[in-house]
Amino acid sequence: MAAAGAGASAPAVVLPAAVVVHSDLPSELERFCITKAQEALTTQKVEKDQAQHIKKALEGHTGGLWHVVVGSSFGMSVSHENNSLVLFKIGRVHILVFQTFDDASLVRKEGAATHVHRKVERKTDEEDEGDS
């Protein structure tokens, strides 16, 4: 008799559904970000590597400079291009994705960027159970 788990493949990771907290991204790009985040959370163990996975995918897909923050507790105050920010959570992990100007010499025009200020904090287990 083989030992339990010997020769068996690891079970597929089932992630909770993504919950969008704030977004001004076009819906197709929002779905792309969520899909890449789900990939990152299942293939990468370190938050820095998860963020890099999402960033590289976005820059390859759309071009430009993208910034990604992955974690359960962080504050943010960012300026970003219009229609280029999404904040969502998958379980206890929050993912912030936004794009900035890719040319340092670009003269900003009125309305060219939006400012967002938020604080993301981990909920207690009791609060998480109340969200279900």
Image: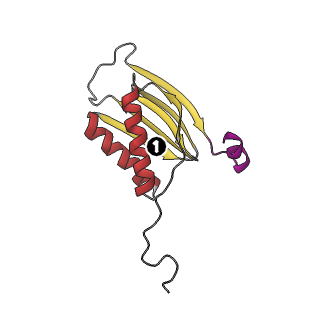
Q: Would you say 77 lies left or right of 84 here? A: right
Residue 81 is drawn in which quadrant?
top left
Total marks placed: 1
Classify 109 as above or below 42.
above
Closer-to-camera residue (38/118): 38
For mark 1, give the secondary structure. Answer: strand
Instruction: Return the residue found at the far front.
Output: 1
Residue 19: percent from the left, percent from the top?
54, 37
Q: Which residues are magenta?
A: 121-132
The C terminus, quarter of image: top right
Please state which amino acid type lies under the numbered disc 1: Val
Q: Position of residue 76 (x, y in %)?
A: 52, 36
Foreground: 50 or 91? 91
Residue drawn at the location 48% of the way across and 84% of the way down = 2
Which residue corresponds to the image point at 58% horizontal and 45% vertical from the top-left? 73
Residue 66, by quadrant, is: top left
Asked if the stretch drawn in magenta spans residue 125, the answer is yes
* Residue occupying the point 45% across, 24% down: 24
Residue 85, percent from left and from top: 43, 30
Where is residue 57? Give x, y as percent. 31, 43
> Does residue 32 lie above or below 2 as drawn?
above
Few, some or many residues within 10 Å of mark 1 (<14, 14–19, 20+)? many
Q: Quadrant of residue 102?
A: top left
Q: Residue at x 29, y 19 (%)?
A: 107
Check the image and report above or below for 34 versus 3. Answer: above
Q: Which residue is tagged 1?
A: 69
Q: How is the image coloured?
A: secondary structure
Q: Quick one: which residue is furthest to the bottom in this view? A: 1
